[in-house]
Amino acid sequence: MHAHDSYDYAVIRVVPRVEREEFVNVGIILSCERSGYLQARIEADPARLLALDPQLDLESLQRHLDSIPRICRGGAEAGPIGLLPQRARFHWLTARRSSIIQTSPTHMGKCGDMDAVMEHLMQRMVRVAPAKAGR
């Protein structure tokens, strides 16, 4: 990949109670069309999710979240959406929804190492830094 390749990404959000519009960032969908890169990484924190809705069905939620990386990989095991071209799968995954799993608006950038970008985005947008001592 060249240093000037552009990429698109969206943050995966869980909105346990859609009417309240509160959400927890749980992952990233990252795409670079030129290099054929389309991946999702998900790290859902059950404690953070249950803080927004103690009645949330975590098992069902996880099954739905697991379908996102499968769709990114593509192929028949991902269902009809998995058979679409890579760019179409990215747009389908990032389409606006009023459901418990949503994505942020799509953002873009330029880079040379998509795996490093994924790690940076996960650290910045999904993971929570540990609390400082004394707080």
Image (spheres, rainbow, N blue to C red):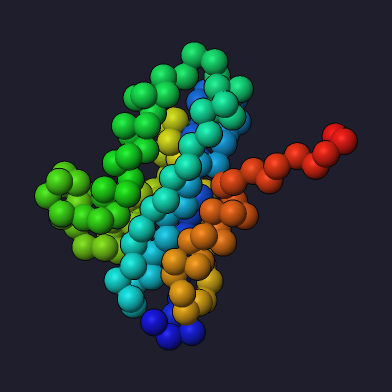
- Residue in the picture at 57% in, 26% down: 47
Closer to us: 116 or 75: 116
37 in relation to 67, above or below:
below
Q: Position of residue 65 (x, y in %)?
A: 37, 38
Q: Is residue 131 left or right of residue 74?
A: right
**From this viewpoint, is residue 103 visible?**
no
Closer to us: 25 or 134: 134
Quarter containing the N terminus: bottom left
Q: Position of residue 34 (x, y in %)?
A: 34, 77
- Residue in the picture at 59% in, 54% down: 123
44 in relation to 104, above or below:
above
Q: Residue furthest top?
A: 55
Quarter containing the C terminus: top right
Q: Position of residue 118 (x, y in %)?
A: 48, 61
- Count the marks: 0
Q: Position of residue 79 (x, y in %)?
A: 16, 44
- Residue in the picture at 32% in, 49% down: 69
Q: Is residue 113 left or right of residue 70?
A: right
**From this viewpoint, is residue 113 visible?**
yes
97 in relation to 72, above or below:
above
Closer to us: 126 or 15: 126
